[in-house]
């Protein structure tokens, strides 16, 4: 499984049989079977861990790929569309797994490194639960590593271009819910009630002032109300309204300040109308932060593979479950261009997105290069007693 055709066949097999978070049973079995066939030590739990040791080096690095698909009905017309109705690999995790398995083949057969490589195949990245599940199982205690790395493809960027940066690279994601309790009433007599729709609408508008007036310009926070639910009817003013939404932030401080301001605004507006409001704010993805040395290592390995590198790219607004790994161990999250045309340039999570198979050998070779750079074999010159 070192040729592009072999990698492509594997990736398309993963694509045909996608599985959502914590239900990746076939996927896990396929990954574990390939690793065992390579002679890699395999451990199964929430995810799959492969351990590959060579030489006597005491350093270890971890490479992580995500396995889960999304609950999206695929609209593509290629020959390997999803066979699982309502589920598809719309984020490229099929390609991420394949690139890492391709690297495992190279490293198992050709070695060229001294130390330990821990291959982490993680479940349920999309809901921000898989990394913590593996960490809670003790993956970092059982297989301690010095550094951890992860790749994600990025549509609309030239194939194989590497983007990364030191410091914060991906935003956090927090989900909020605001419950407004007023007084229902007859639509013809609004003065007799406390209309939860009017109060909720005022809260929706006021929440936008968090970004525009209460945080520093350029903070990069996004506040989005995505649902507005009430118990009203055609001639009944609602007494209850529920607002749900999503907050992205680049720093923990801005995230926590946003939560405080959200509660202050909702409770204050509701009180002004003689109603009440309660706010819940739950962070599912923390900010992803890259360490300086791993970022430099990624840039060096990519350049050695002849790849175009931007090692100080703009921070991304999306979130990534890898954040929990890089919060525990120095790490680097990097992006690989998926291509600029066709389905390869369609947005992540689009129903007609497709991972670019041309990226498979590029990613596999990059992973192998990074391992050999970080776990070098030290040649000894034994001529005339020299060492």
Image (tube, grey):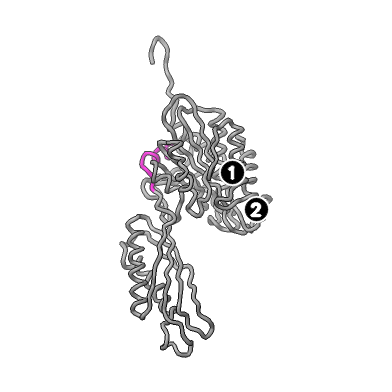
Expressed as whole percent of the image width and height from the top left, the position of residue 57 reads 43, 26
Expressed as whole percent of the image width and height from the top left, the position of residue 174 reads 42, 59
Magenta residues, as a range?
289-300
Is residue 351 shown left or right of residue 316?
right
Q: Residue 221 is drawn in which quadrant?
A: bottom left
Q: Nearer the viewer, residue 176 or 366?
A: 176
Q: Which residue is mark 2?
A: 82
Expressed as whole percent of the image width and height from the top left, the position of residue 244 reads 46, 67
Q: Which residue is mark 1?
A: 28
Q: Nearer the viewer, residue 152 or 126?
A: 126
Q: Quadrant of the N terminus?
A: top right
Vertically, is 308 above or below 199? above
User: Which residue shows up at 42% across the image and 88% down it?
Assistant: 192
User: Which residue shows up at 47% across the image and 83% down it?
Assistant: 237
Expressed as whole percent of the image width and height from the top left, the position of residue 79 reads 68, 50
Instruction: Say which label, 1 or 2, has the lower sequence index.
Output: 1
- Evaluate whether residue 362 shows in this view: no
Identity of the residue furthest to the bottom in this view = 188
**Element type at marker 1?**
helix
């Amino acid at each position: 499984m070192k040729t592009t055709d072999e990698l492509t066949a594997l990736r398309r097999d993963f694509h045909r049989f996608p599985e959502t978070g914590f239900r990746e049973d076939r996927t896990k079995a396929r990954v574990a079977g390939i690793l065992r066939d390579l002679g890699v030590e395999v451990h199964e739990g929430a995810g799959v861990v492969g351990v590959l040791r060579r030489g006597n080096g005491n350093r270890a690095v971890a490479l992580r790929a995500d396995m889960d698909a999304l609950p999206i009905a695929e609209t593509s017309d290629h020959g390997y569309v999803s066979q699982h109705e309502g589920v598809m690999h719309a984020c490229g995790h099929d390609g991420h797994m394949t690139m890492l398995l391709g690297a495992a083949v190279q490293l198992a057969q050709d070695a060229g490194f001294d130390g330990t490589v821990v291959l982490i195949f993680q479940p349920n990245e999309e809901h921000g639960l898989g990394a913590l599940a593996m960490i809670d199982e003790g993956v970092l205690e059982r297989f301690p590593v010095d550094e951890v790395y992860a790749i994600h493809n990025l549509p609309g960027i030239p194939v194989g271009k590497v983007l990364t940066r030191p410091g914060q690279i991906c935003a956090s994601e927090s989900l909020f819910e605001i419950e407004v309790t007023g007084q229902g009433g007859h639509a013809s007599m609004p003065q007799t009630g406390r209309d939860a729709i009017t109060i909720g609408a005022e809260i929706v508008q006021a929440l936008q002032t968090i970004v525009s007036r209460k945080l520093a310009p350029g903070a990069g926070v996004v506040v989005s109300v995505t649902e507005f639910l009430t118990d009203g009817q055609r001639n009944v003013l609602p007494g209850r309204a529920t607002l749900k939404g999503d907050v992205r932030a680049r720093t923990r401080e801005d995230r926590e300040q946003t939560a405080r301001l959200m509660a202050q605004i909702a409770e204050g507006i509701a009180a002004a109308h003689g109603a009440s409001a309660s706010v819940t704010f739950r962070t599912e993805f923390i900010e992803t932060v890259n360490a300086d040395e791993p970022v430099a290592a990624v840039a060096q390995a990519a350049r050695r593979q002849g790849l175009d590198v931007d090692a100080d790219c703009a921070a991304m607004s999306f979130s990534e479950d890898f954040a929990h790994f890089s919060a525990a161990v120095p790490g680097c999250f990097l992006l690989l261009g998926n291509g600029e045309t066709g389905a390869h340039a369609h947005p992540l999570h689009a129903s007609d997105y497709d991972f670019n198979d041309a990226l498979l050998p590029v990613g596999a070779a990059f992973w192998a290069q990074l391992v050999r750079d970080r776990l070098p074999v030290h040649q000894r010159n034994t001529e005339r007693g020299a060492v």
